[in-house]
């Protein structure tokens, strides 16, 4: 526990604290922590203070104790105030109190701040406990100090996971173990998985598939290819299927247990790559729960991750969490790149950190490295058996500089590289052979199969060779021990870490490794004359860390080396051995400061505070499940966003005397199958024709157009000849092409068959300029092609490399804005395209002007679309309905569940067709009206400015008959005539673009250009 000290103005510089209860008659160790600028700075210089209170005691500023008479009233007040002592986030044993911890008091917690009333469900595959049997057959449970999640806390924490017990827990004893684990202080909920399922889940999929891939290992030519998830040791597809089924089944088991113990408002904190799909299942069951996911392994590059056959499912599972955490930004950067390349998602940096927009939600990505608690190491060092091991090691290594290494026996840990570097070090400095000793402890990793066997063989061979070459008098220079247990307990490590002068880590790829932190804390406790653990002075230890271990990024006092460069590691070993004591002490102090400041508690507190700060609506109806199976995700929708009620729409439709129906084209009234890049390219190059609506859809549209009360418009971004070919034969159907630039009026009048422009075409030389600039960047960017229509030029980079295509598109966008600044056009950036088109052209502009034309407000309006380009159309319709108080009979809908401005959704295009068919077959005519009245019910030109709002027909050649809307499309006199020469090879791109934007600069004579090679430059 910790308590803050404050200097009251009246008694400054005396610092005081609130009354703090401590046990009477028991020794209490304490130290003062100095904070600077709200952050922990250092501990006081002395080692520790010791207090044995026999009565109520006040500690003076000089360290002396002042006794106070303990009256009954004082004791009562102490008892009453005991609950208000400010505890640390990590509870008893906090090595470094956080300034945030000191404000954590009982009572309701505020938004974004962790309080004692908060509940946390910590979910990991293995519970952070050690389970064993007593001699009487009862269960013995203790905290696993190796586990990062074993930290003590004052929060209401429930831990959920499986139990690590050799041979598995017998079925008949599971109930008794569950009862023991549920008791305080453990509060653990065990999950029991059958042996066969656990083997497929953990050994086959997690360790043989995800583990090497997440560590950037990809076997292609070896006996264990990693090309497909779950197919490492068998060519059979059944094993892959079974392993994946086991992986998903275990996620469901965990989901059921979490749902059982989850209370409203509890934070759910998931750990490890074992449970990547769990956020998907939990978000369906508790859409408003705040879910965090933290990975303790590296995250692979996109080129490695994409080799997994279930890559999209795994990414979507991770993105179903509200917070995804990593130890380093390097790992987060790979994750962000995978999201961009595989799912097309972008990320932004906002005030709370990095956010990925997914399904209408913001997924927070955090990067905070875990630490180690001083008190945990300190308490273990005091154990008699640890001190005895230290003394034995000192006697064994007396007079020698000890280099220590502790690693699992697998290739990732780079043990052979360490031995080769040590051998090179001895070859370069043979005079040190009798003065140094490498103490290498290896932990068995037999579950790694051939990996373990191969590494074990190499290590034994190298150890024998080094000892044979450099051993003196039968004394080895390498002491090699292999422990059969997969985990080396902290008490077994600290003796070696305390005695070692140099700690060496040569891993080739590593996630969280806290052993260097333990080494720092162990060395800090051992340094100097009068150490309570060593009878002689002990110089500070120094570390040699691989560049590929995560703690290298935060422990700057260590020597860093690339393990693949044997000579570099050998030189680092030499520098560490001969390093002066003064420099050793400075390097150790640098690392001690970081380790004491960044404890497990501070790491936990920051992450939970970020998770609690995630904004989620408490309205369950705002979160809608989209998709099926593992592709299903929970999307955040506006409250009240529901499926469109067809009966309500038809009812309002029948009651209205004037109706307007606005329908998007592809993806709304028919499935636009141009989803793969080959088909899209073939359509763009006119090799393949676009798909067309079904005959049923055409009949439904024709039925709707027969009703004189209706005006039906199909709005499309496609070219007008495509729309004309598909729908032009339907009498009275209004058509809008190229996002509103061309339109054909609805109605049966003879003048409604002509295509018109929304604005004047004006000067078209901007197209040639746009094409010239786009072609330059098209030649420099693979996978890019141009699409040109009568109203726009599009630079399409959906098939280009996502990152390079984005960079090139930004540069292209800047050049286009510069070159075309004299034209009334706009440069539009889409997700995978850059479009240049006249300003003021869009579907929403057309709808806005169309609505303002009506003499009477339409009594019914239906607007349906399917993609982001339709969002503004919904806004226009809703704003018009709000303005004229007709919101009850105006409907907006999107096809598919997705974040949208629309009021409702339809699941698929067939639902749209079914609704249109129902409306078309409903009563077309009101029997109470005469034929003349029915004709007059049709819409007429606008009540406001009927003479000025006119659309000019377009001749087949494209020439205008009369001026259209007033527009600034007329060409400025300063705009240059389009040059008809190529870019000379001697001209830079910047000079070329400047020439395009400046009048009269391109003046090269044809005979001068003839001297250029025909294939040089750009022709236009």
Image (cartoon, helix red, strand yellow):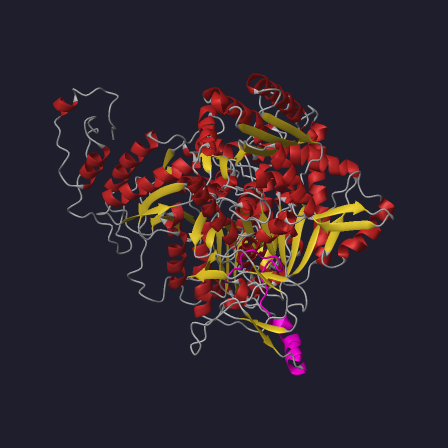
Q: Is the residue 667 above or below the residue 850 in the image?
A: above
Residue drawn 26% across and 21% down?
1015
Q: Is residue 871 visible?
A: yes
Image spot of residue 459 (x, y percent): 61, 23
Image spot of residue 859 (x, y percent): 50, 66
Image spot of residue 300 (x, y percent): 53, 36
The quadrant where residue 630 appears: top right
Image spot of residue 832 (x, y percent): 42, 41
Left or right of 894 on screen, residue 230? right
Q: Is residue 539 a member of the stretch shown in magenta?
A: no
Q: Is the residue 537 above or below the residue 786 in the image?
A: below
Left or right of 338 on screen, residue 718? left
Q: Is residue 937 visible?
A: no
- Front-most of residues 290 and 806: 290
- Quadrant location of the C terminus in the rendered image: top left
- Front-most of residues 429 and 37: 429
Residue drawn 31% across and 40% down?
811
Badge count: 0
Which residues, given as a range, are shown in magenta? 72-99
Left or right of 534 on screen, residue 750? left
Left or right of 21 on screen, residue 660? left
- Quadrant location of the N terminus in the rendered image: bottom right
- Front-most of residues 966 and 191: 191
Residue drawn 40% across and 48% down?
739
């Amino acid at each position: 526990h910790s308590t803050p000290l404050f200097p009251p103005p009246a008694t400054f510089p005396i610092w005081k604290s609130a009354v703090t209860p401590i046990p009477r008659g028991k020794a209490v160790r304490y130290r003062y922590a100095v904070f600077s600028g709200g952050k922990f700075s250092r501990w006081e210089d002395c080692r520790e203070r010791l207090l044995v209170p026999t009565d109520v005691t006040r500690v003076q500023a000089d360290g002396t104790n002042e006794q106070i008479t303990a009256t009954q009233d004082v004791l009562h007040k102490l008892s009453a105030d005991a609950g208000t002592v400010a505890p640390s986030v990590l509870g008893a044993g906090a090595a470094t109190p956080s300034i945030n911890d000191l404000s954590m008091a009982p009572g309701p917690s505020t938004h974004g701040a962790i309080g004692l009333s908060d509940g946390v469900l910590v979910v990991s595959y293995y519970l952070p406990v050690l389970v064993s049997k007593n001699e009487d057959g009862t269960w013995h449970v203790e905290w696993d100090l190796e586990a990062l999640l074993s930290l003590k806390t004052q929060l209401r924490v429930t831990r959920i996971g499986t139990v690590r017990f050799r041979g598995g827990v017998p079925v008949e004893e599971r109930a008794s173990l569950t009862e023991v684990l549920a008791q305080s202080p453990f509060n653990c909920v065990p999950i029991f998985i059958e042996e066969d399922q656990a083997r497929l889940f953990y050994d086959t999929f997690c360790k043989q598939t995800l583990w090497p891939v997440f560590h950037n290992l990809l076997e292609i030519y070896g006996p264990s290819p990693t090309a497909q998830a779950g197919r490492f040791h068998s060519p059979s597809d059944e094993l892959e299927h079974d392993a994946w089924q086991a992986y998903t089944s275990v996620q469901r088991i965990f989901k059921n247990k979490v749902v059982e113990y989850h209370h409203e408002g509890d934070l759910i904190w998931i750990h490890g790559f074992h449970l990547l799909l769990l956020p998907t299942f939990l978000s369906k069951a508790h859409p408003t729960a705040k879910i965090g996911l933290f990975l303790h392994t590296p995250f692979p590059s996109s080129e490695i991750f994409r080799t997994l056959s279930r890559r999209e499912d795994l990414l979507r599972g991770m993105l179903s969490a509200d917070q995804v955490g990593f130890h380093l930004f390097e790992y987060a950067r790979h994750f962000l790149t995978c999201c961009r390349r595989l799912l097309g998602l972008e990320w932004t940096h906002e005030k709370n950190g990095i956010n990925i927009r997914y399904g209408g939600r913001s997924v927070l990505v955090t990067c905070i490295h875990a630490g180690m608690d001083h008190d945990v190491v300190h308490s273990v060092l005091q154990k008699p058996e640890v001190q005895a091991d230290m003394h034995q090691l000192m006697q064994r290594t007396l007079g020698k500089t000890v280099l220590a290494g502790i690693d699992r026996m697998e290739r990732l840990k780079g043990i052979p590289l360490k031995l080769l570097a040590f051998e090179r070090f001895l070859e370069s400095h043979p005079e040190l052979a009798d003065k140094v000793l490498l103490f290498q402890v290896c932990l068995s990793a037999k579950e790694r199969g051939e990996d373990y066997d191969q590494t074990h063989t190499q290590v034994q061979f190298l150890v024998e060779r080094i000892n044979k070459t450099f051993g003196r008098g039968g004394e080895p220079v390498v002491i090699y021990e292999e422990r059969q247990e997969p985990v080396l307990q902290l008490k077994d490590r600290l003796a070696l870490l305390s005695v070692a002068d140099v700690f060496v880590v040569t891993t080739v790829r590593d996630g969280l490794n806290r052993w260097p932190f333990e080494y720092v804390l162990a060395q800090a406790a051992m340094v100097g004359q009068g150490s309570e653990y060593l009878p002689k002075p002990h110089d500070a230890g120094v570390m040699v860390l691989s560049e590929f271990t995560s703690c290298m990024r935060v422990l700057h006092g260590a020597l860093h080396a690339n393990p693949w460069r044997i000579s570099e590691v050998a030189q680092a070993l030499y520098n560490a051995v001969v390093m002066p004591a003064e420099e050793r002490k400075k390097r150790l102090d640098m690392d001690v400061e970081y380790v004491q400041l960044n404890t497990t508690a501070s790491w936990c507190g920051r992450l939970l505070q970020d998770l609690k700060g995630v904004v989620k609506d408490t309205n369950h109806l705002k979160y809608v499940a989209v998709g099926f199976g593992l592709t299903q995700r929970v999307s955040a929708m506006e409250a009240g966003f529901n499926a469109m009620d067809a009966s309500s729409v038809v009812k309002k439709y029948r009651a209205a005397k004037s109706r307007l129906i606005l329908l998007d084209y592809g993806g709304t009234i028919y499935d636009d199958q141009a989803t793969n890049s080959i088909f899209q390219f073939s359509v763009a190059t006119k090799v393949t024709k676009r798909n067309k609506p079904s005959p049923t859809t055409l009949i439904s549209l024709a039925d709707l157009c027969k009703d004189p009360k209706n005006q039906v418009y199909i709005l499309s971004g496609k070219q007008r000849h495509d729309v004309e070919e598909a729908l032009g034969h339907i009498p009275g159907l209004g058509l809008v092409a190229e996002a509103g630039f061309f339109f054909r009026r609805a109605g049966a009048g003879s003048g409604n068959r002509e295509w018109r422009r929304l604005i004047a075409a004006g000067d078209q030389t901007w197209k040639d300029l746009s094409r010239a600039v786009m072609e330059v960047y098209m030649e420099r960017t693979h996978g890019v092609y141009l699409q040109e229509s009568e109203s726009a030029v599009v630079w399409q980079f959906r098939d280009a490399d996502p990152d390079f295509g984005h960079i090139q598109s930004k540069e292209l966008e800047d050049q286009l804005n510069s070159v075309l600044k004299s034209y009334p056009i706009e440069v539009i950036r889409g997700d995978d395209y850059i479009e240049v088109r006249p300003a003021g052209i869009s579907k929403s502009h057309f709808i806005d002007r169309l609505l303002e034309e009506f003499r009477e407000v339409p009594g019914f309006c239906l607007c349906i679309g399917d993609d982001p380009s339709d969002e503004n159309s919904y806004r226009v319709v809703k704003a018009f309905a709000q303005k004229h108080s007709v919101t009850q009979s105006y409907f907006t809908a999107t096809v598919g569940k997705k974040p949208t401005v629309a009021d409702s959704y339809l699941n698929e295009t067939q639902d749209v067709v079914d609704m249109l068919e129902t409306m078309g077959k409903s009563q077309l005519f009101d029997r109470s009206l005469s034929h003349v009245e029915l004709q007059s019910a049709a819409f007429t030109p606008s009540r406001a400015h009927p003479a000025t709002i006119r659309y000019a027909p377009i001749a087949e050649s494209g020439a205008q008959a009369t001026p259209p809307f007033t527009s600034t499309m007329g060409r400025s006199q300063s705009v240059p005539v389009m040059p008809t020469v190529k870019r000379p090879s001697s001209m830079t791109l910047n000079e070329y673009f400047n020439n395009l934007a400046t009048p009269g600069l391109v003046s090269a004579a044809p005979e001068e250009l003839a001297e250029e090679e025909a294939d040089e430059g750009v022709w236009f």
